[in-house]
Amino acid sequence: MLGRGWMLVALMMVVPFSWSPLRAQSPAQGAGQRPWWRPSVIYEVYPRSFADSNNDGIGDLNGIASRLDYLEALGVDAIWITPCYPSPQKDFGYDVSDYTNIDPMYGTLADFDRLVKEARQHHIRILMDFVMNHTSDQHPWFLASRSSRNSQYRDWYIWRDGKGPGQPPNNWISDFGGPAWTWDAKTGQWYYHYFEAAQPDLNWRNPAVQRAMFNVARFWYDRGVAGFRLDAVDTLYEDPNLHDNPIVNGEMVNKYNDNLAENHVILRRLRSLSDQYDAVLLGETWTDNISQLKQYYGDHDDEIQLPMDFMFATVNTLSAPKFRHQIDMIESSGEWPTFVITNHDMKRSYNRYGDGVHNDQIAKLMAALYLTLRGTAVMYYGEEIGMSNNDPKRLADVLDPLGRMDWPKNKGRDGERTPMQWSDAPNAGFTQGKPWLPIPASYKTHNVATESQDPGSILNFYKALLRLRRDNVAFADGDYLDIDPDDANVLCFLRRYQDRTVLVALNMSGQRQRLAADLDRYDPGTAKATTLLTTMKSPPRDLRRVELDPFAVLIVQVGQSGEQSGSATAGSK
Ligand code: NOJ
């Protein structure tokens, strides 16, 4: 990656050209009134893999605390920590056995409190992961529930008789494969689990469950967390009559155990609790279409503030029309978007969008996409250094239950959960012990220490981009206007707030592309343009005659004659 010599190009180019922008309409909430989470970048930390302070090969809370300087310098506003509660780790923390504690492998509640306090000093908020749908089968509630049909906890989970001997109550299939029901010989009934058998679903129709789980939310809010990422939030409720799901074209449609209306009642209540703490809800909201996604905001914007747009995240090809379509959909919904390009359940963006040759440029291009659009952005750890997947080669090496179940068709999620690459030292500087997952060979070049020294690295591009996003109000509060809607290769849009206008041009192709946007259409007057950030070898002098390099990013401020924004222009490699 670092082989080619290249440079940081002109810090501030003020280029006159013939075009002045339309004055943007002010969005309803301007700076000062907007909620803290709107312009935020939320950084997802997978705690097993972020930083290991005690060298046992597994990351921990003190490890995260030791990297707060890094996170602050990177420029993120909040971190979402995936589950760090006590857990048998069958699904690596998404099987919680105690909601109000920290797993000893990650530290203690005192470590957590210290992390919150120190993070605050670094201007970073902490979001926890709230696994509402299910517990571990080792949670005391479930142990009591399965101990006897007469247990006071029996109705905390979904227990039913089968259709007949050896036959589960209905045809529902677990997301992890096989029937969504497991037979319990001791009490002679089946229990329901949307996910693994070790993750029994809570019965949200039971008011005692609701009370207990709302107490969990209060517990963490009182400790200073700024919100929750809501796990599997679409599956809280099931049809009480347990109708069989329909099979359409050979595929089960989860009509009776997904997206039930009752989910929204709980979300409204959780939102109202969260509002008391000025907290945010970030939803794991997998949806098929925009009207489904819109429902998660609530009819009166009284549910999840930030339901993640996975329709955008699963555009799996580098395609300007496909991304544009998804942006148009969420923009036309009138809601505040939440953009994400990958997470601990999805292949790294470096692999999904990279062409095998220009992956570093493409990593910067993708960064510029999700971090310049109107909306909150969620960034997965390691994206900022171009971490890549390290999928297991043999079934014997697979730890993720999904990978073990479906090998080799699906190699599971270990590959995108590997330890953070801090340096080119052994084990990428993550641990002096044996890392819980093997580290990809790319750590030699793609690591924090090495990239920090290289002005053209992905890391320095991310830093410049995040600084720009923070400093320029057009990104926080501006509207979005696609000014080149038919271009098959280039996404070109404006972000406009009052007298600020920023133009973003992203070449999603491997060929040079002429910027085809009809800029004169907006105003033939005279204006100044300032190149804020680009990967172009030579930033353009005249925006009406721009030829974008392959996979180039060009971010230009227009209409602010002579104004210096202080943001660096980063070159290409
Ligand atoms: C979604 C989480 O992101 C995933 O990692 C987990 O396996 C399932 N929910 C079950 O909790």
Image (cartoon, helix red, strand yellow):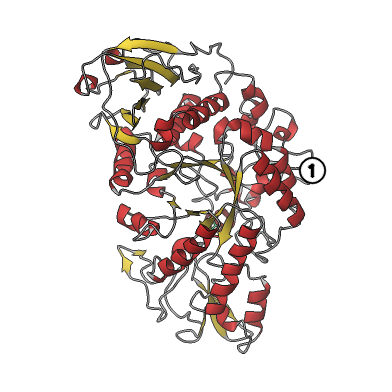
State the SS at label 1. loop
Who's the residue at 45% across and 17% down the image? 564
- Identity of the residue furthest to the bottom in this view: 150
Q: Horizontal and vertical percent for residue 179?
A: 49, 71
Q: Can residue 340 be seen in this view?
A: no
* 351 or 544: nearer the viewer: 544
Q: Quadrant of residue 109?
A: bottom right
- Depth check, front residue: 553 or 147: 553
Q: In this view, does 233 lie to the left or right of 259?
A: right
Q: Nearer the viewer, residue 389 or 23?
A: 23
Q: Work out whether 556 lies above or below 264.
A: above
> In the image, what residue type sits under mark 1?
Asn
Relative to 286, does residue 472 appear above or below in the rendering? above
Residue at image x 67%, y 66%?
97
Q: In which quarter of the image is ligand 1?
A: bottom right
Number of disc labels: 1
Residue 357, placed above or below residue 284: above
How many residues crowd around disc 1 within 10 Å: few (fewer than 14), some, or many (20 or more)? some
Q: In this view, does 105 lie to the left or right of 151?
A: right
Residue 496 placement: quadrant: top left
Q: In which quarter of the image is the N terminus?
A: top right
Where residue 67 sits in the image (x, y, percent)? 69, 37
Write down the residue under mark 1.
55
Q: Where in the figure is residue 362, as x and y percent of width and height?
A: 45, 28
* Closer to us: 482 or 123: 123
The spot of residue 343 in percent (x, y) is 52, 45
Q: In this view, does 145 lie above or below 330?
A: below
Who's the residue at 48% across and 37% down the image? 349
| Horizontal arrangement in the rendering, residue 17 relative to residue 203 (left or right) | left
